[in-house]
Amino acid sequence: MKKVLTIAALVLAPLTLVGSGGLNYTCVDGTMDGGNCYPGHVHFTGQGTPSTIHITVTRNSDSTVYDDFDYDASNGVDFTEVLYPRGNYTVTITGYPYAASQNLSTGSDGN
């Protein structure tokens, strides 16, 4: 049993590092009283990614893809998206073996 646990730990340990760099955002056009960004410009930053990543920005209510592109992240992640109209959005970054996503709402109630 110890051998199985050791092998499992060796296999699963690298998976715990996936997304460890994180993805942060700043509300460029301001933050509402409830903590949501105003609909508009949202700036994203992050570190610890591979040098080439893929970014997808999706509006959750209707699955509209706002952006879907490869990105040179040699100096980290640093980009701005226009998240309008108000709603819930998901920004996903992938690049083997890295994966991170950030959910956020713009507008008063995020709908």
Image (tube, grey):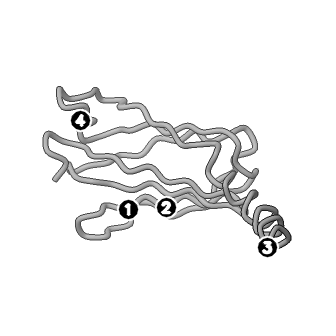
Where residue 66 sits, quadrant-wise, is bottom left
* Badge 2 density bin: few <14, some 14–19, many ≥20, Cα 10 Å: some
In the image, is 8 to the left or to the right of 45? right
Quadrant of image for the N terminus: bottom right
Q: Which of marks 2 and 4 is nearer the N terminus?
A: 4
Residue at the spot x=50%, y=58% of the render?
A: 92
Find residue 38 and name its label.
4
Disc 1 to disc 3: CB gap under 8 Å: no
SS of the residue under disc 1: strand
Percent from the top left, x then y, of residue 24?
Answer: 50, 37
Q: As displayed, is residue 96 above or below residue 100?
A: below
C-alpha span from label 3 to label 4: 54 Å
Pointer 2 residue = 56
* Badge 1 density bin: few <14, some 14–19, many ≥20, Cα 10 Å: some
Between 56 and 21, the residue placed more toward the observer is 21
Residue at the spot x=24%, y=70% of the render?
A: 62
In the image, is 108 to the left or to the right of 15? left
In the image, is 51 to the left or to the right of 34? right
Pointer 1 residue = 58
Percent from the top left, x then y, of residue 100?
Answer: 56, 53
SS of the residue under disc 2: strand
SS of the residue under disc 4: loop
Q: Earlier in the sequence, mark 1 or mark 4?
A: 4
Disc 2 to disc 1: CB gap under 8 Å: yes
C-alpha span from label 1 to label 4: 17 Å
Q: What residue type is labelled 4?
A: Tyr
Pointer 3 residue = 1
C-alpha span from label 2 to label 1: 6 Å
Q: Nearer the viewer, mark 3 or mark 2?
A: 3
